Image: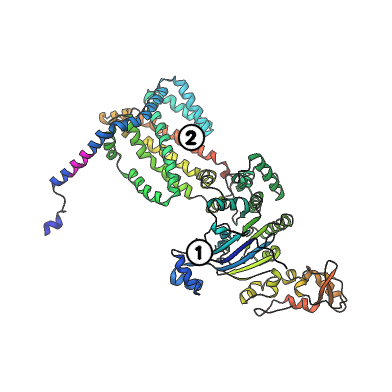
C-alpha cells in the first residue's frame, strides 16, 4: 500500500501529570515505569513516546483499557491538553506552534469532537445544539439553521429539533452530538468513546450510522474505544495503548493474526474470530482449487459454506475478477484458534 | 512573673488611646479631604433614589398597585402570587403604611439593582481567576460577619446621615450572596459541557455568555433572592442612619414599647419579603424550563 502524507502525525509525544512534569520526564526517558514514577515521584505517566501516523479519510481506532491514556491522547490533537514534550502535526502544520487564534481556528474549522457523555448544552434545543459550532464559525443564522437541519435529518432525528437534550434517550443525544460535530464540516472528527455509554443494540445502530456516513463523507476519524468488537467493526487501522504506550498499531487483520505481544494476545482471545478474520489474512499463494470462489473480504463465517462444499477443501480467493490466492479449510479452522504465543504467524 | 501570666500584657492605656486617636484623626482627615468628592460621586445615585421614591409615593395608589401587580404577573405568571400581592398592598394601604412601604420598596429595589450590577461581574471575575477568588472570599466573609453597626460608623463619618449612606450599608450587607453564588454557579457548570465548547473553538466570551452564565442562572437567581432578603432585613438598621421607610416606625415602636405599631410594620416588611421571594424564585425557575424534563 502506498502511503500518502499522513493527515495527523504524532511524534514522540509524552504527557506527565504532576507538579514538575519536566523533571519527571527525564526519569521516564531514562526508563522509569508508570508505577515506579507514581510511587517514587508522585507523578502520573499519561503518555509515553507516542508515535502515530494517522492516514486521511480513514477511521483510526485507538483502543486500550481504562486509564491507558486514550482520552489524554485524543485531547492532545486539538490541544485541550498540552503535551509535556513531543510534536503534533495536522496537514503538515505544527499544532504546538499555533497561537491562540490559530488554535481556535483549528478547532472551529478543521477538527470537531464527539464526547462520551455527549457534552450537549442542556439549555439549548437539538436544533440550537447542532448549530453551536456554526455559530462559533460565524456562519449566519439562516444558513446555520439550514445546515443544522440537514444534519439532524441525516442522523435520523427529524421532528426532534425543538426538544431539549434532557428529553431524549442516550442514543438520541449522541446522534445530536454526532450531528453537531458533522455540521461544522471539519475534515477531522475526534470521537472519545462516543458510543461507550450506550446500550449494545443502540451502540450497533450508531456504528452503522457512522459507517454509512463515512462511506460518503470520507472524514479522518479518530475513534476511541475500549471495546475490541467495536474497534474491529469500524476501524481501518487500530492502535492499542497500554499504560500510556502504543504497543501495536496496525490494520485490524494484522493485529488478529500477528499480535505483537502477550498482552494483545490476551486482548484478542475472546473475540469471535469467525466473524472478523478475513480471507485475505489466511489465504496462501494461488494454487489449483476446486471450490467456488470466495472474496478477499469474506470472513471465515461467510466462506465456510463454500470451503466445506469444495471437494478438495480449497477455494480460490478473488478480488473482483482477479484471483489473489487460495484458501484451504484447514487454514480457516486453524485461524479460528486464537494465536497462542506472542508474535505467532499464521500465514 | 505571676503577674505577667495572670494579667495579659496589654498596651498601656495611654498608648492605646493614642493609637485610637491617631486612627480616628487619620480617618477624619481623610473624610474631610474626600467626603465632598465622595458625596458628589454618589449624587446621581441619590437623585435617582429620591426620584424613584417620589414617583412611587406621588403616583395615584391604584396605578402603583396595578404596576406592581403587572410586574408580579410578568415575573411569576401565577394568579395566586399576583392576587396575594394585590391583597397585601391593599392591607398596607388600609393600615396607613403606604408611604413608608413605598420608601422601603424604592430603597430595596435600588439596592438590589446596585448589588446585581456590582455583584455579578465580581462573581464572574472570581470564577475566572482563582487569585481573585482567594482575595475576594475573605472580604466577603468579613462583610457578612462584621456587625453592621461597626461599618455604619465609617460610612456615617464619610457621608453623614441620609439615604446614600443607608443604601451603602444595605449593599455592604446584602451583596455577598450574589457574588458567591455567581462564582459558585459558574464553577459548577459541567466540565464536559465546557470542554465541548472549548473543543468547538469557543472564545472566553462565547463560553461565558453561551454556556456558563445560562447554566449558572439557577444559582445566580438564588443569589439575587438571598440578596433581596438580606437587604430587607437591613431596613430597620438603615433607618437608624436616616433612611425613610418601614424601619422608622419600628424604631419608634422599640423605644416607646408600641407593640402593635412594631408588629404591623414588621409584617409589612415580611409581606414585601415574601412577594420578592416568590416572584424572583418562580421567575428563575421559568427561565430554565429545560430542567423540567426529568432526565439530566
Ligand atoms: N488531569 C489529570 N491529572 C492527573 N492524572 C490524570 C489526569 N488526567 C488523566 N490522568 C491520568 O492519566 C492516565 C490516563 O487517563 P485517561 O483519562 O487518558 O485514560 P483513558 O484511557 O481515557 O481511560 P477511560 O477508559 O477510563 O476513559 C490515568 O492514569 C489517569 O489517572
Ligand atoms: Mg477516557
A121 or A172: nearer the viewer? A121
Question: Are the residues flagged by discs 2 and 1 from a single subunit?
Answer: no
Residue B112 rendering spot, x and y as whole percentages: 41, 35
Q: Is residue A263 above or below residue B142?
A: below
Which percent across, then down, holds residue B98?
39, 24
State the quadrant of the N terminus of chain B: bottom left
Crowd around label 2: few <14 · some 14–19 · many ≥20 (10 Å) = many
Q: Residue B243 location in percent, x, y?
A: 32, 29
Q: Is residue A142 left or right of residue A215?
A: left
Q: In the image, which residues are magenta? A: B19-26
Q: Chain of mark 2?
A: B
Q: Which mark is residue B279?
A: 2
> Residue under circle 1?
A84
Name the chief secondary structure element in magenta. helix
In whole angstroms, how far apart are the C-alphas of marks 2 and 1? Answer: 52 Å
Please check the rendered image and state whether residue A235 is part of the magenta-colored stretch, yes or no: no
Q: Secondary structure at mark 2?
A: helix
Identify the residue shown where x is 40% and y is 28%: B106
Amino acid at each position: 500500500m502506498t502511503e500518502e502524507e499522513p493527515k495527523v502525525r504524532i511524534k514522540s509525544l509524552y504527557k506527565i501529570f504532576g507538579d514538575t512534569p519536566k523533571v519527571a520526564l527525564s526519569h521516564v526517558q531514562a526508563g522509569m515505569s508508570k508505577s515506579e514514577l507514581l510511587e517514587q515521584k508522585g507523578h502520573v505517566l499519561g503518555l509515553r513516546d507516542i508515535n502515530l501516523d494517522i492516514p486521511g479519510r480513514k477511521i483510526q481506532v485507538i483502543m486500550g483499557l481504562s486509564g491507558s491514556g486514550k482520552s489524554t491522547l485524543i485531547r492532545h490533537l486539538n490541544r485541550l491538553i498540552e503535551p509535556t514534550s513531543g510534536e503534533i502535526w495536522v496537514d503538515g502544520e505544527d499544532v504546538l506552534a499555533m497561537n491562540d487564534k490559530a488554535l481556535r481556528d483549528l478547532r472551529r474549522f478543521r477538527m470537531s469532537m464527539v464526547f462520551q457523555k455527549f457534552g450537549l448544552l442542556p439549555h439549548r434545543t437539538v436544533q440550537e445544539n447542532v448549530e453551536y459550532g456554526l455559530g462559533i464559525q460565524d456562519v449566519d443564522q439562516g444558513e446555520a439553521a439550514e445546515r443544522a437541519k440537514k444534519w439532524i435529518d441525516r442522523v435520523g432525528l427529524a421532528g426532534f429539533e425543538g426538544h431539549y437534550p434532557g428529553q431524549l434517550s442516550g442514543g438520541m443525544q449522541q446522534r445530536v452530538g454526532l450531528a453537531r460535530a458533522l455540521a461544522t464540516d471539519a475534515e477531522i472528527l475526534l470521537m472519545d468513546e462516543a458510543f461507550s455509554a450506550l446500550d449494545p443494540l443502540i451502540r450497533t445502530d450508531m456504528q452503522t450510522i457512522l459507517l454509512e456516513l463515512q462511506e460518503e463523507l470520507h472524514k479522518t476519524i479518530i475513534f476511541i474505544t475500549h471495546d475490541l468488537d467495536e474497534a474491529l467493526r469500524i476501524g481501518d487501522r487500530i492502535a492499542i495503548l497500554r499504560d500510556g504506550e502504543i504497543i501495536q498499531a496496525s490494520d485490524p487483520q494484522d493485529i488478529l493474526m500477528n499480535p505483537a505481544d502477550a498482552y494483545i494476545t490476551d486482548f484478542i482471545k475472546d473475540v469471535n474470530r469467525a466473524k472478523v478474520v478475513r480471507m485475505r489474512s489466511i489465504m496462501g499463494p494461488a494454487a489449483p482449487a476446486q471450490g467456488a470462489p470466495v472474496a478477499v473480504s469474506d470472513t471465515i463465517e461467510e466462506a465456510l459454506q463454500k470451503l466445506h462444499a469444495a471437494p478438495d477443501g480449497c477455494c480460490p480467493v478473488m478480488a473482483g475478477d482477479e484471483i489473489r490466492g487460495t484458501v484451504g479449510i484447514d487454514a480457516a479452522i486453524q485461524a479460528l484458534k486464537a494465536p497462542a504465543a506472542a508474535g505467532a504467524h499464521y500465514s | 512573673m505571676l503577674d505577667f501570666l495572670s494579667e495579659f500584657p496589654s498596651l498601656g492605656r495611654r498608648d492605646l488611646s493614642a493609637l485610637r486617636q491617631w486612627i480616628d484623626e487619620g480617618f477624619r482627615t481623610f473624610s474631610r479631604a474626600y467626603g465632598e468628592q465622595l458625596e458628589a460621586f454618589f449624587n446621581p445615585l441619590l437623585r435617582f433614589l429620591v426620584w424613584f421614591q417620589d414617583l412611587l409615593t406621588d403616583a395615584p395608589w391604584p396605578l402603583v398597585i396595578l404596576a406592581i401587580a403587572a410586574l408580579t404577573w410578568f415575573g411569576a405568571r401565577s394568579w395566586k402570587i399576583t392576587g396575594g400581592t394585590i391583597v397585601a398592598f391593599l392591607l398596607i394601604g388600609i393600615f396607613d403604611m403606604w408611604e413608608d412601604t413605598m420608601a422601603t420598596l424604592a430603597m430595596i429595589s435600588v439596592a438590589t439593582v446596585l448589588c446585581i450590577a456590582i455583584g455579578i461581574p465580581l462573581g464572574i471575575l472570581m470564577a475566572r481567576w482563582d487569585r481573585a477568588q482567594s482575595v475576594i472570599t475573605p472580604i466577603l466573609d468579613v462583610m457578612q460577619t462584621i456587625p453592621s453597626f461597626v461599618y455604619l460608623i465609617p460610612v456615617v463619618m464619610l457621608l453623614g446621615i441620609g439615604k446614600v449612606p443607608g443604601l451603602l450599608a444595605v449593599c455592604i450587607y446584602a451583596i455577598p450572596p450574589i457574588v458567591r453564588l455567581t462564582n459558585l454557579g459558574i464553577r459548577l457548570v459541567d466540565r464536559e459541557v465546557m470542554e465541548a465548547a472549548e473543543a468547538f473553538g469557543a472564545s472566553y466570551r462565547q463560553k461565558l455568555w453561551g454556556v456558563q452564565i445560562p447554566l449558572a442562572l439557577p444559582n445566580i437567581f438564588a443569589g439575587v433572592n438571598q440578596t433581596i432578603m438580606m437587604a430587607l432585613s437591613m431596613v430597620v438598621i438603615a433607618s437608624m442612619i436616616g433612611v425613610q421607610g418601614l424601619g422608622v416606625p419600628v424604631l419608634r415602636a422599640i423605644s416607646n414599647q408600641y407593640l402593635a405599631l412594631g408588629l404591623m410594620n414588621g409584617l409589612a416588611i415580611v409581606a414585601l419579603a415574601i412577594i420578592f421571594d416568590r416572584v424572583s424564585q418562580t421567575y428563575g425557575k421559568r427561565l430554565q424550563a429545560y430542567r423540567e424534563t426529568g432526565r439530566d
